[in-house]
Image: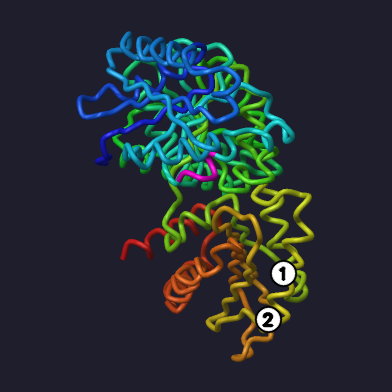
Amino acid sequence: MPRPAARILVALENPAKEDALVRLAATLATSPDAELHLAHALTPDETARNGDSARRHGLDHAAQVAAEVGVVASPHLVEGETVTEAILASAGEWGCNMMAMGWYADVDRRTILASTNRALAKSLDIDTLIFKEKSFHPARKILVPTGGGGHSLMGLQIADDLARAWGAELTVTRVARDAECRPENPILQRYCQQVRQDTEIRMRLLNIDAPIEVVLSPDVVRPIVDRASGSDLLVLGASNDWRQEEHLAGSIPDEIAYRAPCSVLMVRSRGPTPSQLSNIFWEHTIRLDLHPKDKWEAIDQMVDILVEEKQVPVSERDRVLAAARDRESESSTAIGRQTAIPHAPIDGLPGIIGALGICPDGVDFNGLDGQRVHFIFLLLTPLQNYRSYVPVLAQIATLMHSDEARSAFRKCQTPSELTAVIKRQEHR
């Protein structure tokens, strides 16, 4: 898969002491057409307090570290009223398509809320790498837990690039989650096989050749942390939830980053195209056998899917539920063809979040056509850009207008089968 030349901005908090971050970024910038920019931001308060001579010396040191990797880096001392403003302007000026930064504090909510990293990752619409160093050297073993989102796909790319550069062993892990974990269950066996096949397809598209381990577990975090004990670097795709906003702490990747014994590189890709349903509805946010008694209980269950999958913080469940119920009270979100799309704008949400539920018995959504609803698509969208859900609604409506698609949905026995149906329809 062709990729643009890397133009990487490394945001350095302390240039003289971030050698591992610089080496990692330089490793990703070794191609002849790549660029590496090392930037330390000075605010007026810092300039008045400390001057800039020590920082310039630190940047020169960081450039020398990059040179040891074989990369000519451009050091920059940039100024702005805030660190975020200075880095944001610099990324635009140099045409950067990736940013790397270190995380040196604990992974807890109070620390995250106060961090400059949060503001930077939230503000820049470019691929972002956040490196949590625990014990770092050019890795011999790299572990990549992968799932169904765009961040995870980019994590595979980055991990493979690093493994090739370092001659490291790359292992890909996919957790097939099931509450009961009964290996003899034929449907569960099919699910595990589909998960493996889906991962193999993704890796072939990326031209990645590495062993794949499918782990059957009721929990996502524990098997990954256990396997990280034998690795030097864990490369994680960031979650699709509120990690970059007020509720960063508590997502599945954050739990893994906190508990993993090795260094962690968290990868967040540039925002996915809203109209791609497969970027919004993926296997962990799909349920195939819901039996709500009415549409209000259906909405409750859909919101709880997102809470269970840590796409919505537990503390925000009631607010999200109230918003979805308020919207449904205005008018039914049933669109015909046995489909309903309850949705709600949420203040502070960084992107669209979705869940998909199949109701075999159907549920009354008080639609104009009087049909019971069997297919429920819940969408949460940013209040600041509430119209972003319109193309998604259109995509769902087009998909569910097809008798073939609805029939295929009903026949699905695993979430992977359903995501495959969505992807097939997208590529027609």
Which residue carries the number 2 mark?
365
Instruction: Return the x and y of residue 315 as percentages of the image width and height.
Output: 78, 50
Instruction: Return the x and y of residue 151 as percentages of the image width and height.
Output: 47, 42
287 left or right of 406 in image: right
**Residue at 49% across / 47% down in the picture?**
149
* Quarter of the rendering containing residue 331: bottom right
**Residue at 32% across / 22% down in the picture?**
74
Which residue carries the number 1 mark?
298
Gap in angstroms between the C-alphas marked 1 and 2: 9 Å
- Tell me whether circle 1 and circle 2 mark residues in contact (CB < 8 Å): yes
Identify whether 242 is placed above or below 113. below
Q: Amino acid at mark 1?
A: Ala
230 left or right of 67 in image: right
**Residue at 29% across / 35% down in the picture?**
207
Q: Is residue 356 visible?
A: no
- Quadrant in the picture for the N terminus: top left
Task: Assess disc 2: are there few (<14), some (14-19) or many (≥20) residues with their C-alpha within 10 Å of its C-alpha.
Answer: many
Direction front: furthest residue: 48
SS for dot 1? helix
38 left or right of 188 in image: left
The dominant secondary structure in magenta is: helix
Q: Amino acid at mark 2?
A: Phe
Magenta highlight range: 120-124
Task: Return the residue nearer the eye: 307 or 208.
Answer: 307
**Residue at 53% across / 40% down in the picture?**
121
Instruction: Return the x and y of residue 375 as percentages of the image width and height.
Output: 58, 71
Task: Assess disc 1: are there few (<14), some (14-19) or many (≥20) residues with their C-alpha within 10 Å of its C-alpha.
Answer: many
- Quadrant in the picture for the C terminus: bottom left
Of the numbered discs 1 and 2, the one sitting upstream in the chain is 1
